[in-house]
């Protein structure tokens, strides 16, 4: 495997001395920016990224296409050299290392890709052996370890199958086994499930979660799919236009997304709904409800309607499993009468339902 051999753009400050503790995090991006030269001039892909990832995290980085997330993940192992800023891995500054030292540090950072990147002329066990051969493992020792890793990914019976004979999910399992071969501390997942069907995606996410929990390997997960974040990650950063606009625990951002970019990803909004002919329901006053724990299983809305004798208009409803917790969310329109609407909100608060008001004026986009 070849790596980008770029020039170091900035020298390190003098206080970064050998042996000095630089970070309590396994990965720390400090003021990272990245520009590309194009025929139309410079394009800024990343701007002043500051991001800390702890040991054992399953850290999701989510954004729409073109937001800069793939460039960001490639700066972690310096496949893309930052134009500015520092990348710290396991208390060592990677930006500024000579190629030999950088390649040694890279051995603890593996990567899996959307298109698997398997060697077509090698069978499954040969693909898993490949990084071990580069590292100088004796052949028998490499084969033994490769067989063990294929067993970890439940693919020991396809050891002699070539990529052309494997399904998409099986190819990704081989890629995961290959990523584990170097005993990494971190695995970078760049849209690793985007080419897979939903059922296969779930199985791959379960495998990655098992690896994260049982082996303590830190995962950095690049995706545009909210379901990947919900199923796999404990923390998330939202990236937009090359900048991190929001970050934190997945559960917390699911409940209380603060930025417009996070709301678009986490908070479903129904667009146009008809107003009740009697004027009892207003589509301009919406309420987002998050049901957590016990409340996720109780008929709270039904009880509210019966008790207050006031209707609501349902715009959206869904049940999610975030981590290991069942959560529900719903978007409703309250009664048009402000007195009744306040009673509805009070009822929901008393039922331990998290509520967020969404006021939509005419012509305003949510």
Image (cartoon, rainbow, N blue to C red):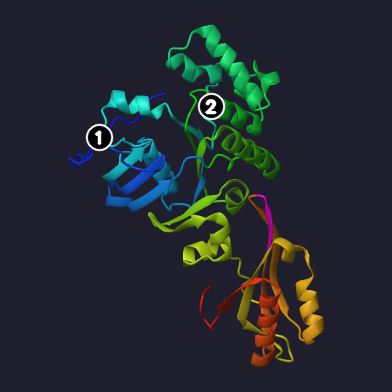
Residue 63 can be seen, yes or no = no
Residue 305 versus residue 37: which sits nearer the camera? 305
Q: Main secondary structure of the magenta part?
A: strand
Q: Determine the residue located farthest toward the right in the rendered image.
A: 306
Residue 185, how many percent across, how many down? 47, 32
Classify residue 190 as left or right of residue 14.
Answer: right
Specify which label sits upstream in the sequence, 2 or 1: 1
Which residue position holds label 1? 96
- Labels 2 & 1 near each other (Cβ < 8 A): no
Q: Determine the residue located farthest toward the left in the rendered image.
A: 14
Please identify the quadrant where the N terminus is shown. top left
Residue that appears at 31% across and 52% down: 44
Q: Above or below — where is 134 with respect to 72?
A: above
* Residue at mark 2 to residue at mark 1: CA–CA distance: 27 Å
Residue 98 sits in which quadrant? top left
Residue 114, how many percent across, how many down? 54, 38
Residue that appears at 24% across and 32% down: 18
Residue 350 sits in which quadrant? bottom right
**Magenta stretch containing residue 325, yes or no?**
yes
Circle 2 Cα neighbour tier, 10 Å, few/some/many (<14 / 14–19 / ≥20): many
Which residue position holds label 2? 180
**Magenta stretch containing residue 220, yes or no?**
no
């Amino acid at each position: 495997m070849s790596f980008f051999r770029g020039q170091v753009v900035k020298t390190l400050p003098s206080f970064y001395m050998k042996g000095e503790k630089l970070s309590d995090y396994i990965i720390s991006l400090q003021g990272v920016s990245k520009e590309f030269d194009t025929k139309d001039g410079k394009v800024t892909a990343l701007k002043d990224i500051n991001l800390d990832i702890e040991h054992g995290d399953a850290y999701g980085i989510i954004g729409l296409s073109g937001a800069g997330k793939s460039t960001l993940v490639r700066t972690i192992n310096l496949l893309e050299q930052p134009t500015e800023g520092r990348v710290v891995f396991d208390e060592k500054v990677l930006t500024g290392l000579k190629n030999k030292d950088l390649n040694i540090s890279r051995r603890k950072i593996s990567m899996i890709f959307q298109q698997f990147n398997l060697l077509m002329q090698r069978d499954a066990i040969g693909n898993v052996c490949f990084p071990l051969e580069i590292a100088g493992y004796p052949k028998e020792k490499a084969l033994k370890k490769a067989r063990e890793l294929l067993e970890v990914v439940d693919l020991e019976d396809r050891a002699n199958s070539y990529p052309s004979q494997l399904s998409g999910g099986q190819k990704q399992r081989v890629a995961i086994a290959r990523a584990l071969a170097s005993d990494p501390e971190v695995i970078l997942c760049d849209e690793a499930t985007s080419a897979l069907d939903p059922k296969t995606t779930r199985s791959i996410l379960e495998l990655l979660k098992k690896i994260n929990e049982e082996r303590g390997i830190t995962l950095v997960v690049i995706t545009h799919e909210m379901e990947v974040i919900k199923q796999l990650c404990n923390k998330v950063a939202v990236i937009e236009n090359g900048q991190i606009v929001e970050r934190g625990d997945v559960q917390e951002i699911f409940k209380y997304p603060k930025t417009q970019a996070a709301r678009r990803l986490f908070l479903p909004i129904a667009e146009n709904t008809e107003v009740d002919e009697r004027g009892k329901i207003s589509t301009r006053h919406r309420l987002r409800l998050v049901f957590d724990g016990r409340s996720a299983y109780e008929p709270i809305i039904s009880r509210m309607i019966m008790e207050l004798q006031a209707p609501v208009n349902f715009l959206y409803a869904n049940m999610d499993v975030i981590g290991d917790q069942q959560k529900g969310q719903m978007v409703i329109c309250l009664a048009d009468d402000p007195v009744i609407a306040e009673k509805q909100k009070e009822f929901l608060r008393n039922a331990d339902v998290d509520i967020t008001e969404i006021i939509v004026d005419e012509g305003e986009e949510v």
